[in-house]
Structures are given as C-alpha cells and as structure tokens.
Amino acid sequence: MLAFTIRRLLEAAVVMLTVALLAFVLFRFVGDPINQMVGQDTSIAEREELRQRLGLNDPVLVQFGRFIWNAARYDFGISYQVKRPVTSLIAERFPATFELALTAALFAVLLGIPMGVYTGIHRDSWLSKLFLSVSLVGISLPTFLIGILLIYVFAVQLGVLPSFGRGEVVRIGGWTTGLLTASGLKALILPAITLGLFQMTLVTRLVRSQMLEVLRTDYIKFARARGLSDRAVNFGHALKNTLIPVITIIGLQLGAIIAFAIITETVFQWPGMGLMFIQAVQNADIPVMSAYLLLVAFLFVLINLIVDLLYVWIDPRVRIYGREA
Amino acid sequence: MMAEPPVLSVRNLRVEFPTRRGTLLAVDDISFDIAAGEVLGIVGESGAGKSLTGSAIIGLLEPPGRVAGGEIRLGGRRIDNLSREAMRPIRGKRIGMVFQDPLTSLNPLYRVGDQIIETIRTHLPLGEREARARAIELLTEVGIQGAERRIDAYPHEFSGGMRQRVVLALALCAEPELIIADEPTTALDVSIQAQIIQLLKRLCRERGTAVMLITHDMGVIAETANRVAVMYAGRIVEIGPVREVIQSAHHPYTRGLMGSIPSLEGTSDRLTQIPGSMPRLTAIPKGCAFNPRCPLAFDRCRVERPDLMAVDHSLAACWLVAREGAEAPR
Ligand SMILES: Nc1ncnc2c1ncn2[C@@H]1O[C@H](COP(=O)(O)OP(=O)(O)O)[C@@H](O)[C@H]1O
Ligand code: SF4
Ligand SMILES: [Mg+2]
C-alpha cells in the first residue's frame, strides 16, 4: 500500500514536470509580452531594461529552471497585465470556480447515480425511458448552447434566475463565498446545471450500463437464491460493484468540469479562473496563463491520485495487488 | 404407515420463453419427486433444460422465461404460484442453491464471513455475534481450516475448491430441506471434484436434506445419486433407480450417455460419444426428439412422440419399451 502510494506520487510528479515544460514552451511563442505591457511611446532602451528585469534575456534553461523553482513554491510571478502577483489573482478567482465546479459535480453525482440505478433496475418503466431521452439531450447539446437556452428560459422569459455574475458574496478570511446569500445561491443554479449536465448524463448512463451488467452476474443470482431482500441485493451487492468503475470516471470528469468551466464562466460572466484565463489569453499575459495551466493540471493529477487510492480502499482485489507492488 | 409428502414434488412443469419467432418450450411437461435424504441426479447434455428446471423451482427464472404450466410443491405446499414477496423467505431458508462456478458465485467485494452472516441473519433470528459464531461453525464443518481467521478473508483469497466449500456453507446456513446443486463441480479441478461431492453428500445425509444434483458427469451420478432423471430437449426421457439406469438403461439416449463414463481404471479415456447434437428448441424433430441420432429408431419413432412408460423400476420414453411388450403406456 505504501509502495503503491509512493509509485503513484512519483508518477504524479513526472506528469506535473511535463505539463510545466509544455506550459513554459507553449507560452514563449504566444507573442512578445513586452509589447503588451508597454505603450506605443516607450523607448527601445526602456523596453530592453524591462526585458532584462523580467529575466527574458537569460538562457532558456535558466528561465525554465527558475520557472519550475518558483512554481514549486507557488510563485508564478507578476501578471504582465494588472501588475500584481498571479497567486493573489488566483486566490481571488479560485473560490468562484471551486464553488461552481463543486456544485456542478454534486449535481451530476447526486442526480446521476440514483437515475442510473433506477433505470438499471427498472429497465422498462416509462420513467426510465424519460430519463434516458432527457440524458440524450444532455449528451448531444454543446455546453454553451445549454447555457444560452437556460438563460433564455429562466432569466429572459421567466425572469426567475440571474443570467450572469455570482450575486452577493460573503468574505470569510481569504475566501469569498456565494453559498451564504440567497442571491449567491440563485446565481449558482444555472451555471452549475450548464456545467454539470453533461457529466450528469454521463454518470446516469454509466451507472445504468454497469448496473445492468452487474445484475446479470452469478453472484447477484446467488444472492437472490440465498433469499436476500431486493434492497440488499440491489443497493448492497449490486451498487457497490457498480460504483467501482464509476468512481474512476467521476474522478476524471471532476477534472473535466474544472477545465470546461472556461466555457460556462464565459457564457455566464462567472468571475472565476476560467474567465481570468480567457482574459489572460486575450492579453498574452503569460504568467497567468501558465499558472492556470499548471493549476488545472495539478488538480487533475490530485484527483487522479485520490481516485486511485479510493479504488484500492473499495476493491479488496486491487488492495492485494497494491500491497504486492 | 402413511407416507410423508416428498420434500419436492414437480408435476407437469413447463417453462417457456416467448420470443419474436414464437414461444419456445424449454422445459416440457416434466414430473419427479425427491424425498427427504434422497439425492436425485439430473443428467443430460448441455441445453437439455436442467438449469431452467432448477431456476423454476427456486423461482428465479430470468424474464421473459416463465413457468407456463404444472405444479411445484415443497413439503406438500404449492410454491410455483407464490408472489415474489412470499417466495423470498423460502429461498435460502427452505431451498438452498449451489451454482456451477464458485469463482463467480461470491461477491468479490465482501468478506466471505459478511456474506454468510448476512444470509444467516436474513433467515434466522440471530444477533451479529451469534450469527458470526454460527458462520465459523459452518465454515469449519465444510472443512475450512482456521475458520476463525478465514472468515474475514475475501473470496479471491480462497482457491476454487475452498470457495465452493464456502458456497456450500452459504447454501446450508439456514438448514434448508432441499438443496439444488447445479453442476457444483464442473468448474473445479478434477482432483477436487470428488472431495466436494463427498462433502455435499455427507452434509446432506447428516441433515436429511433432499438434493437435486444437476450434472452432466455420469461418474458423479453413479457415486452420489439414489435416483436419476435423464433429460433430453426439455423432457425427461428416463427416470429410475441409479443402479438400473446405469447398468441396464432402457432408453438408447441414456445408454449413449453411459458410454461416456470414463472406465474406472482410467486405462481407456476414449469416450463413446453419441453422434450428432441435441436439437435446438426451434427445431425439435417430430416424433421422438432423439430419433435423428438414435441407432435403433424405427418408423413409429419418426411420427409419434413416446411418453414415459413403466419398465422394471424405471420410466422410459421410448417406443422400444412398448414394442418389447412391457407394461402399457401411462
Ligand atoms: N433467455 C433465454 N431465451 C431463450 N432460450 C433460453 C433462454 N435461457 C435458456 N434458454 C434455452 O433453454 C434451454 C435449456 O437451458 P438450460 O436449462 O440452461 O440447459 P442446461 O441443461 O444446459 O442447464 C437451452 O436450449 C437454452 O437455449
Ligand atoms: S423412441 Fe425410437 S428414436 Fe426414440 S429413443 Fe426410442 S428407439 Fe430411439
Ligand atoms: Mg446448465
């Protein structure tokens, strides 16, 4: 188990280094940051002096080393655009994205799993067919279209929910939360549904197909032959086996939710990291862009790690292999 | 002395599958009894309807399969017409089931002890600790050493043979009056098969449990069963005391099956196979279903279907029996 964890940690470190290299290389070719930072009338000498100060004249390897060293200490430099530390920009934006992604993920899981289980057990009921038709919509429509449709219906036509922003937020220490005010909660609904709908349908379909498969297995038939109640069979024996592959997918999708938040945040003008990234791209704000990329990659890797460990914890068969490894 | 009703009594059981191309009759009008302490062997090639008969008795036919006719009585009381809810306490409590593959019969995510305790507590009014003590007793009884320790192991930590012992413990944990064992040794190593069969035999003899032992291994039948029913294409074609069926079978199909018992010394491993294969349910031949493969078939076999007829201590569904001037068809 320890060896397994250490191996996973090493793998995670390799992934992070690779992403760092990508972020570093990619953004060196995005454009000259100096042009973005200074006005038309800045002299060549002044530009050169700025270039020197930012370390842009050092050898590439030195620049990369510095980049890694700083990133490892959670220092991504100063935003070219707003001239403030990138980390403090992130600290401002992170809560918005986190709360949105978490709500979307909860929406996807808390609705997707029961719907999947229901449609798996009651294969032929009309409600199952309704769920599956609705989930087809969620799978086939692109995120931005769903967002716009929701805005049109609930904000424009019915006027019951806001179409942009976070509503009123409360500041607790360094964290701003929209979860404590009515307007903050209302503002969360449409973006969270938009962001989580695809994952919700994915979870539903995945749980359903797993459930159907598990219900056909010998040990389920044997469990029934032992006279266990339907509840014990469906929710004890079947569901637990169903959830093993589902956990992996949910974990990966959590990463996807954070990444896809860019689109949702743009549609709803949600002041999170995704919106920050879009603005950074428009202004070739390299430190912000690379910080965002690294952070998202880090979250991906972290979630993966947690999923792996969770897997080992749930499935005794993997637990053995993990111990041997 | 007035006889007790048999533990299991099956009368004219029919199981059918409605399909797009008509209804398939997978079990066609079969009848048999099993008394307490008796082992009835059910043999026949794969697809003969043996497993479906077992599933029908315990009420676990997979839809769209359904019991289309006949009666199933357990201890004299009908159980084929019980509701789902009324049937559930009978499964596991009064009828225990053992399936073919011990590797897949146990839920891989639960400790074997938890699966046994769960079953015990479903059927018996025991607390967690008493149930656990009983589970350890059962595991010891089926021959698992160090049961106090092994009870907390997961299924994958047991070998195939040991897992089948666990499955036996599970089937026996509420002391059922009937055990349906569906090819309990087919998936096991040959060296272990005999041990499991011996164990099953001993446990059931001690408890007076009736056993329906499904297998296509005539060797197992010869060693274990009191009576044998031979199934072919959904029907029983011969049923009788094990001695008689093995040594002087009346039905050509049964004789063909007997030819496939490996010789005792193991010197000859040549199996006398019956040429051809069992018809599919969609294409059951007119007359005797066995006639295309039967070396003794004659005209009548191709037009008229034989029913079971009494001969010696058995019943056999073959026109030869009638021709040889045995008792009248019944
Ligand atoms: N779900 C099903 N639909 C149609 N036919 C089935 C189904 N399940 C089983 N059968 C048919 O029923 C027959 C008997 O099956 P089974 O009882 O499993 O045979 P066996 O004697 O090998 O245990 C087989 O011919 C099989 O094709
Ligand atoms: S009835 Fe005819 S075909 Fe059928 S088993 Fe007897 S002899 Fe063979
Ligand atoms: Mg079978």
Image (spheres, rainbow, N blue to C red):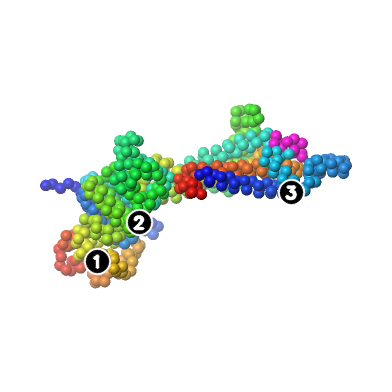
Q: Main secondary structure of the magenta part?
A: loop
Estimate the x, y position of residue B267 in percent, counting from the top left: 29, 68
Quick one: label 2, few (<14), some, or many (20+) residues within 10 Å? Answer: many
Could you say whether the residue bearing mark 2 is in a helix, strand or loop? loop
Q: Position of residue A49 (x, y in %)?
A: 84, 41
Question: Can residue B216 be seen here?
Answer: yes
Say yes or no: labels 1 and 2 on the same chain: yes
Q: Chain of mark 1?
A: B
Q: Write the start and end of the magenta stretch as one range.
A: A78-89
Q: Are marks 1 and 3 on the same chain?
A: no
Residue on which disc 3 sits: A61
The amino acid marked with disc number 3 is Leu
Q: CA distance from mark 1 to mark 2?
A: 26 Å
Q: Quadrant of the C terminus of chain B?
A: bottom left
Q: Quadrant of residue A190?
A: top right
The residue labelled by disc 1 is B255
Q: Quadrant of residue B185?
A: bottom left
Which tag is nearer the camera, tag 1 or tag 2? 2
Q: Amino acid at mark 2?
A: Leu
Tell me which image quadrant ligand 2 sits in. Answer: bottom left
Q: Was residue A101 drawn as part of the magenta stretch in this picture?
A: no
Name the side, left or right, on which B239 lies relative to A83: left
Q: Dot 2 falls on which chain?
A: B
Residue A89: give x, y in percent of width and height: 70, 35
Q: Hey, what amino acid is under mark 1?
A: Arg
Q: Earlier in the sequence, mark 1 or mark 2?
A: 2
